[in-house]
Amino acid sequence: MDIGKFIAQFFYRIRYSIVWGTFIVTALVVYFTQFLPFSYTVEGSIYAGVTNATSIDGSSINVTAVNSTFENLVNLAKSRSTLEKTSIKLLAIALTYGEEWKDNSYIQAKHYRQLLQATPREVLTLVDRDSVNLTLEQLQKYRKEDRNNYVYQMFHLTMPFFSAKALNSVEIKRAGNSDILNITYTSPDPGMTQKTVEIIISELQEAYEILRFKSTNDVIAYYEEQVRLAKEELNDMEDDLTAYNVSQQIINYNEETKALAITRYAVEDRLELAHRTYEAAIAIRQELEGSMDIRGKIMRDNTNFLQQLDKISILNEEIIKQEIFASDKSLANNEKLKKDREALQKAEENIGLISDELNQMNFTKEGVGLDDMILEWLHAIIDETKSAAEVKVLDERIQDILRQFAHMSPIGTQVSRKERAVGIAETNYKTQIEGLSDAHLRQKNIEMSTSNLQTIAPPSYPLTDNGRQRVLYIVIAFLGSLVFIITFHLIIELMDRTLRDPVRSKRLTGLPVVAAFNGTSNLKFRGYLKACNRTAAAYCCRNLNQYIQTERPTVINLLSMEPGEGKSFLARYFVQYWATEGLRVRIVSHSVDYTVTDSAYIQAQQLSDFWVLNEAEQKPDIILVEYPATHTATVPLTVLQKADANLFIANAERLWRDSDDTTLEPIRKALADTPFYLYLNNASRDVVESFTGELPPYTPIHSFFSRLSQLGLTSRKVSIR
């Protein structure tokens, strides 16, 4: 089979179905698509910063984690929570800014009127036309999970713009392998489309921020609270230690106790020295007084002398006290100490003057110089007085130091305990500070590895619609109808068991097709029907002329499977054509010239057994024997074998059944060596033209399509002289 020719003839045969079928379907789509609503598409882009992010430690980003992050972003944007928040915000915007008779950048007037009609009055009372935030707050308070609640119904039913079904059409896709997420949404209202994408981007950023940092923020909040508590505890401990030191008058316990011990040892050494000086002074005084006798007694009993001694004692006590309790630096700058020393020196000089007045004897009884003795005695008296005063002061100082030791001893234990508690609190505080620092570090690491979602292409207000996709629908309708019609006819072509054309007839019957005949069913060219039939009959007769015998009549048998398949009709056209060639044709019909129920017919071995030419008739050149239908009567196979040619007449519009194969099979085997052809009657004009060539009328359009069906793509009709 020539595949190219088969395809060309196939399309030529279904040309009217293709043209009218696609035209009708496309015309219907063109008509009905004019009522489609307008649609507007808005796109926004956000930058996720996942693949290009780096961590604080410089580690690489896990590809699986990157893909998971983008999947989380897409699922988060399409989650029920995000869409529900978007829905109620869109409702608040539409109710707040919508106008009944004027389109604006938020919602068109017709959609706002539809919304007002569907919204209950109790919900409309919640709208604040001056503030969308107050409207949103009121709607959120009004909403509850109740099937009768309008805001709840709006999201769960099929309401345009606000329902979950409408918002689920939002497309969120990653742009290749980049960090860009494209959010696309299409709806009939440009303002609502823009606001939907804008709100979804905002909700996605907020929700992603919460989810991404929630655990870290919780840890940071925990450590901040622990740091605060540890700080308060440390402050309390330090305040308690300070208060205790203040109450016990402690500045630095260790240094104070150390200084106190040093002071004690120094005072004890000085006390010992003072005792020695005092004892020595007493001994010297007593010795000198024994030598001086009455003069010493007179001098001791002198009032002025005693007063000067008391003054020396008092001044010496003051000086000792100041020297003991003051530092070296303060001693150098102590004016009172200087004055006391000067007063002490003056008092000593006064005592010397007093002693000079009492000196009347130059020598004692032992012959010692009295002036020297009195001077030594005076020094002994002064040393005794000064030593006694110093011993007194130092004794008091020793007692004071002992009292301080008694006071400081238990304080040390308490200070150590409190300082230990402060140390523990400080360690805990440092630990919490370290934990807080680590948490902040993890937060910064997350920020560096997954940057905040940033809007890089905010959704803009669409100025033009999408053409309502009308052209797309029309093209789809045209192509779809074309494919459907071709596929439908191709399936029929492959599965149909109607004889129809030579290729299928030969495949079904196994007989070669000698020609085809129009019959009487072609209404379009009914004015040219007889001319076409004569042309078809002439083509068949010319093919049969090769079997015409010269010395005897040529016998051609006409067979059919069923009655009424046109044997007699074709025979008349054959007779007419052969008559034009000067040949005499005799038609032998089963209903006129012989009886099919006669035994002679059934047992016939040749034509003369059941039909003999009348002697009065002229001897014919061709005998056309018309046999009864093979389904209803017996056909003598031996007679058929002796014929010159056999034509099996079949209606091209008939179904070829399995029973037809069964009936034809023995005839086909018996006539294996005898010319046996199939002749299609009532065939289409195209089938007939495949044998005869172009039939009248010879119009240019018909000629053009006829050439195409035969793959004459570049052929043209040109006369050659």
Image: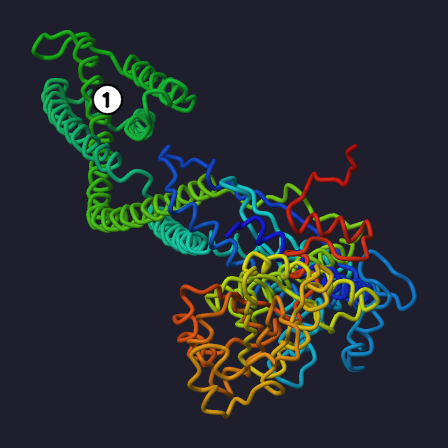
Q: Quadrant of the C terminus?
A: top right
Q: Nearer the viewer, residue 43 or 687?
A: 687
Q: Nearer the viewer, residue 594 or 250?
A: 594
Residue 714, given in percent of the width and then of the height, sits at: 70, 38
Residue 420, given in percent of the width and then of the height, sits at: 24, 48
Left or right of 374 on screen, residue 427? right
Asked which secondary structure carries label 1, the reply is helix
Left or right of 278 on screen, residue 651? right
Q: Is residue 130 visible?
A: yes
Q: Residue at x 49, y 66 (%)?
A: 676
Residue placed under numbered mark 1 in the picture:
382
Q: Is residue 137 visible?
A: no
Q: Residues within 10 Å of mark 1 (few under 14, many from 20)?
A: many
Location of residue 629 with respect to 39 vertically, above or below: below
Q: Residue at x 45, y 65 (%)?
A: 674
Q: Residue furthest left?
A: 366
Location of residue 214 with respect to 264 vertically, above or below: below
Q: Quadrant of residue 101?
A: bottom right
Left or right of 315 on screen, residue 178? right
How many numbered callouts? Answer: 1
Tell me which amino acid carries mark 1.
Ile
Q: Nearer the viewer, residue 236 or 541?
A: 541
Q: Nearer the viewer, residue 649 or 316?
A: 649
Left or right of 37 on screen, residue 401? left
Q: Quadrant of residue 441?
A: top left
Residue 324, given in percent of the width and then of the height, sits at: 28, 29
Residue 535, given in percent of the width and then of the height, sits at: 72, 60
What colouring style does the render use? rainbow
Location of residue 682 with respect to 429 vertically, above or below: below
